[in-house]
Amino acid sequence: MYEFILALHIIAVLVAFGPVFSYPVGLRAARAAGPAALATFHRGQVLLVRYGAFAALVVLVAGIYMALDRFSLGDPWISATFLILIVLMGLYGAVLGPTERRAAELATAGADGGRPSPEYDAAAKRLSLVMTMASVLVAVAIILMTVKPGA
Ligand code: HEM
């Protein structure tokens, strides 16, 4: 049972946070294809953020199960990752969801031929920054989970 929950935990990590790492490639390709492609890209991201938030809940529940079964929620590598996951869930719900929705609207509104508006560029810059922060947080979480410092 424990190994099955561990597999579920890792699959949910992939679903929740895998798209964070492919984000720059998708954004770049959509930008090269023009404003309509950018709008489609950001609409797709809105859906991914929604699935990701659900998968993050699965990461949390499976993680708590394993922590209570074989470790302790007070172990520093677990409590630190717990905090990282809460920050990531906050970023998804409070920043990424609304900003992706806004970017989808801005991508075509006010576009000058093949060039999106400066408002869109500002939103895209904010999204890239948040995605970079999220990538670093996920990488740190994976290192904490596998190295288990202090265990
Ligand atoms: C962004 C958040 C998280 C990521 C990326 C993540 C990733 C991982 C990975 C890759 C493993 C496999 C490690 C290994 O088998 O050596 C793992 C295991 C584990 N995770 Fe997480 N995790 C996250 C959040 C959490 C949270 C919030 C908890 C607890 C509240 C948790 C508890 C555990 C436990 C107890 C294990 C099992 C370790 C073992 O049996 O060796 N994880 N996690």
Image (spheres, rainbow, N blue to C red):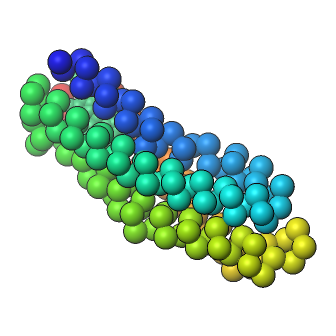
Residue at figure coordinates x 36%, y 43% from the top left: 55
Asked which quadrant contains residue 129, the reply is bottom right
Asked which quadrant contains residue 100, the reply is bottom right
- Residue 78 visible in rendering: no
Total count of labels: 0
Query: At which x and y percent is residue 45?
Result: 57, 55
Residue at figure coordinates x 90%, y 73% from the top left: 113
Question: Toward the viewer: 121 or 104?
Answer: 104
Residue 92 sits above or below residue 55 on the image: below
Q: Is 52 positioned to the left or the right of 65 in the image?
A: right
Q: Is 103 positioned to the left or the right of 148 in the image?
A: right
- Residue 135 visible in rendering: yes
Question: Toward the viewer: 70 or 109?
Answer: 109
Residue at figure coordinates x 69%, y 63% from the top left: 39
Query: At which x and y percent is residue 69?
Result: 9, 27
Query: At which x and y percent is residue 147?
Result: 32, 27
Asked which quadrant contains residue 103, the reply is bottom right
Query: Whereabouts is ligand 1, in terms of quadrant?
Result: top left
Query: At which x and y percent is residue 86?
Result: 29, 55
